[in-house]
Amino acid sequence: MKRVDLIKEIAAEFELIANRLSETEVATVASVVELEPQHLAEIAKRAQKLTGPKNVKLKTVIDKSLLAGIIIRIIEEFGALFIKARICPSKGGDRFQL
């Protein structure tokens, strides 16, 4: 069992190094339900605007403690950025309002 834990730690460290080398920020997106691919694409695009020219990789988490909306957490080298958003219906489909 200790080997499995060690492999998980090695994989996590490898991911951190790979993200640094590719200038990729990992954003965690928490929501009550699974988000549609078009919503995730919109979140990634908006998160990239906030982080500058860096690439953004999304990790999704289902959080049943939320009542509605989403929480986006972006950890950068010098701190963390938390964004609360909600889905707003529009004529062209659902849109995120950050």
Image (cartoon, helix red, strand yellow):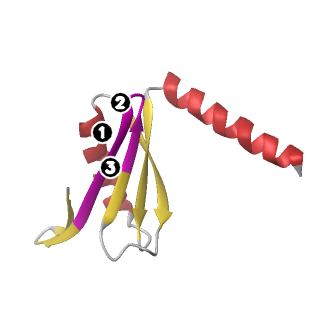
Magenta segment range?
A: 73-86
Residue at 17% x, 70% y is 88
Local crowd size for mark 3, using a 10 Å CA cut-off: few (<14), some (14–19), many (≥20): few
Are the residues at dot 1 and dot 2 in contact (C-beta closer than 8 Å)? yes
Q: Magenta segment: does it hold 78?
A: yes
Q: Nearer the viewer, residue 9 or 39?
A: 9
- Looking at the picture, does residue 7 appear above or below residue 23? below
Q: State the separation of the CA atoms marked 1 and 2.
A: 6 Å
Residue at image mark 3: 82
Residue 82 on image: x %, y %: 32, 49
- Main secondary structure along the magenta-highlighted residues: strand
Residue 63 coordinates in the image, percent (x, y): 46, 69
Q: Amino acid at mark 2?
A: Lys
Hey, what amino acid is under mark 3? Phe
Answer with mark 3 or mark 2, whichever residue precedes in sequence: 2
For the residue labelled by badge 2, is the local secondary structure a helix, a strand or a loop?
A: loop
Residue underneath mark 2: 54
Query: On the image, numbered disc 1 is attached to which residue?
Result: 48
Give the mark, 1 or 2, whose residue is nearer the N terminus.
1
Q: Position of residue 44 (x, y in %)?
A: 33, 47
- Front-most of 93 and 74? 74
**Which element carries disc 3, helix, strand or loop?**
strand
Identify the amino acid type marked 1.
Gln
